[in-house]
Image (spheres, rainbow, N blue to C red):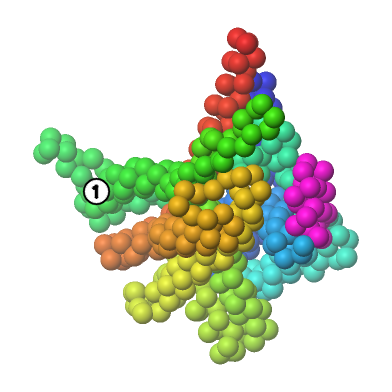
Amino acid sequence: MLKRIGIVLGILVVYRFLAHIPVPMGDATTFRDAMENLISKSDFGSFINLISGGGLASFSVILVGLSPYITASIVIQLMTKAIPRLEELSEDGESGRRKINQWTRMLTVPLAIIQSIAYIYILFQSMGSYSTTAFEPTLHDWFMAVTAMTAGSIILMWLGELMTEQGIGNGISMIIFVSIISQFQTTAAQIGSALFNTEGGETLSLFGWFNLPVNPTVFWILLGFGVALIIAFYFLVKVNEAQRIITINYAKRVHGNQEYGGIKSILPIKLIAAGVIPVIFATAFLSLPALIGQFITSADSNSEIGNALTTIFTAPSASNFSTMYPDGITARWFVYPVMYFVLVVAFTYFYTSIIFNTKEIADNLQKQGGFIEGVRPGLSTAKYLDKTVVRLNFFGSLTLGFIAMIPFVTDYIFIVLMGQPLGLSISGTGLLIVVTVALENLRSLDSRALMVTYDDYK
């Protein structure tokens, strides 16, 4: 058990080491500065930087991160539901799942190549207006950079699978978990800078005995947010574990002198069955018009269409607040959060309908002699499950939408109270991922410990 944990920790150390190896192209410092400037203009870039553990901002070889593998997994999963042949293969036991996993890995490679080329191209487009450094990449530079970034993505996928083989959690999820946790130091630095900023001359009086060199307004706001964070973690755990339990009865069957069945089982349906996938879909969907706008404005800075796309589909944040909203919050500030919330709700319904096939579940129950009390097997069971899932989706999608709104609500409160958003580096989505992965790993560790104990005392 300790050996497995040691292997996982060692792999995570290797992953964090890779996050500091720069892409072999030009001056690394210049490219890091340009990449940070690019991230500040794109909400999708900020999210990719979050789940890559800062690899995007540091212009490291794991810049692409796990996004090609995640995209390939989603595409294969959608194709499995759309193509009957693939659906049959996925139901063909362990051999079918291995074949699908192999295709997912194969699809990851071209996606990583395409994404690497896209990142480099967008970076050079943005450097024209950001840096005066003249650098024209040669074909050799392109080949080395794309090869290094693609190899970094493939290595991350391999490291994730090695951790999964240890049996104490999903390796891909653990890499994303560590990536988000590694960004806490950025948040701590931002909070510390705001807390100890006493340029206005105000200090915190401690019961009139002496004054602490901290900003009193920021102190009380952070204290309130600390309490709110504890409540948020409690709420996230409850939401992640919330599920509807449906009792399944199995009819009695007599075979010879033996009697089978007559037992009860449960069918748990989670409140948020889609996880954080709808948030990723919504972020990617909204980032596309902004990227198109950036391409248009890089070619013609006076283009009204390009400026409109960039302005409307860029998420309001601490980095762009002073330039995009010099007069404070306007009605335009709420456009992106509203669209984001609506898309998260819509994609929650869409993705849940894909991963939770009520007709397939009803058919399997009927074949196994199972039924829900008071509901006829077959079509009636499928309709009953559909109705249940729709009700859960209503509350689950709204909950997921509100969780995704946490950074916008936080920024709004700080803008009203202090005139400037705080800009926390971890979002509601990040918190949800952290809570989900932590609970899954805890269950895996408990299960592994129980197996070891059973082997020792059986």
90 falls in the magenta region: yes
Residue 117: x %, y % from top left: 77, 65
Q: Main secondary structure of the magenta part?
A: helix
Identify which residue is drawn at 64% across, 87% down.
300
Residue 144 in which image quadrant: bottom right
Q: Nearer the viewer, residue 125 or 279?
A: 279
Residue 289: x %, y % from top left: 60, 77
Identify which residue is drawn at 69% across, 29% down.
256
Q: Judging from the image, what secondary structure is the residue with disc 1 in?
A: helix
Residue 82 in which image quadrant: bottom right
Identify the residue at the far left of this view: 208
Q: Which residues are magenta?
A: 85-112
275 relative position to 337: left or right: right
Quadrant of the snapshot with the N terminus? top right
Q: Which residue is mark 1?
A: 220
In the rendered image, the vertical position of residue 371 relative to residue 262, given as above or below: below
401 relative position to 206: left or right: right
Residue 11 in which image quadrant: top right
Quadrant of the snapshot with the C terminus? top right
Identify which residue is drawn at 52% across, 42% down.
249
> Quick check: can you spot residue 253?
yes
149 falls in the magenta region: no
Residue 340: x %, y % from top left: 48, 69
416 relative position to 407: left or right: left
202 relative position to 389: left or right: left
